[in-house]
Amino acid sequence: MLGIKPTVDFVFKKLFGSPENVGILIGLLNAILKLSRPIEHVEIVNPFSYQEFADDKLIVLDIRARDRAGRWLNIEMQVSAVAGLLKRMVYYVCTMYADQLESGEDYVALRPSISICLLGHLLFRDDSIPHHRFRLVDPENECEIPDSIEVHTVEFPKYNLSEDSISEATETEQWAFFFLYANRHEAARLRELLPGVEFQNAITVIETIAAKTEDRMMYDQREKAQRDAQWRLNSAREEGREEGREEGLKQGRAEQIQLLQQLVGQDASSMPSLLEQSMDELAVRLAELQQSLRSRNSG
């Protein structure tokens, strides 16, 4: 097996952000955008550099490019769910659109700005549509502001992928298969499954990373950083759930205390004062009130 995941940031940037691999990027862009006139040439604005991956930090990795038609393009890979992703994408694409103009330039010089997010997880859980395209549209009158901003989300897990049918699948589905399963295949088998020239070139890059000592060491380092970041994210979420459960228990215990205080004829404590106490303190107070109520009832 190749053992190299294209979703790891180092691999993703080397595949699609290296000037010598620009044909691979063009293939991916055309598969997703499906323009009336396919992209034939792009200039990568932030090309691949080893320096980007010099430490173990997880970085927001994107590839920015401009095609011959003047369109500004941003493409990124997200393997895990992050808060505010859609808003961040809107912010990025609007910034990319606004930053085109130099002082004194006319607005007619503005060219379309397109942001694409490839997702290794589910974003829109209430539908089964894998590819969403967002534009500035008036839904009531079916009118749009053309050639402005556009946001694409591509959720790979929503595609129905298998070796038996992948050769007849759409190009976007084939890219989803490549991103999700390239690491599980031998290079020769992957070439059979994905015969397109852009895939053949991408497989060659993956082979090089797998075989080259420096690249393989960098890949292992970046995969570990990505895995550790995911572990920290999952741990934070679990801690949040635990804290939420404890807060819920504390709230419930405080409400019980207020009720028992009323039943035994005491003035009810304020909720803020009760919530300032520890769970153990609340438990002791609750037990005392329960004993007072039992004594009162037995008397």
Image (spheres, rainbow, N blue to C red):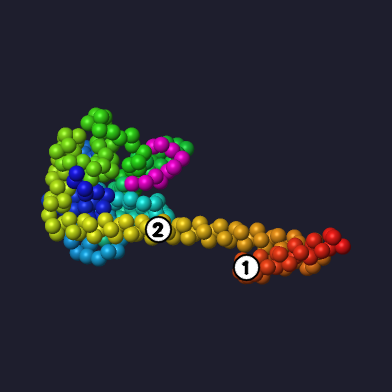
x, y percentage for residue 268?
75, 66
The correct choice, above or below, for 88 with respect to 264 in the image is above
Predominant secondary structure, magenta span: loop
Residue 281 sits in which quadrant? bottom right
Instruction: Say few, some or many: other residues with alpha carbon within 10 Å of mark 1 (under 14 / 14 to 19 / 20 or more).
Output: few
Residue drawn at x 19%, y 64% as measured from the top left: 51
The correct choice, above or below, for 54 with respect to 211 in the image is below
Q: Amino acid at mark 1?
A: Asp
> Disc 1 to disc 2, how far (Cα)?
30 Å
In the rendered structure, the answer to whether residue 33 lies left or right of residue 68 reads right
Q: Which mark is residue 233?
A: 2
Residue drawn at x 31%, y 47% as measured from the top left: 118
x, y percentage for residue 174?
25, 37
* Residues rendered magenta in the picture: 120-129
* Residue marked by disc 1: 280
In the rendered structure, the answer to whether residue 289 lies left or right of residue 71 reads right
Residue 125 in magenta stretch: yes
Q: Quadrant of the C terminus?
A: bottom right
Residue drawn at x 61%, y 66% as measured from the top left: 279
Q: Amino acid at mark 2?
A: Leu
Question: What is the tally of numbered marks visible in this picture?
Answer: 2
- Element under disc 2: helix
Q: Examine the rendering and report whether any part of residue 42 can be seen.
A: no
**Front residue of 214 and 62:** 214
**Front residue of 162 and 280:** 280
Residue 152 in magenta stretch: no
**Front residue of 160 and 36:** 160
- Element under disc 1: helix
x, y percentage for residue 25?
20, 46
Q: Quadrant of the N terminus?
A: top left
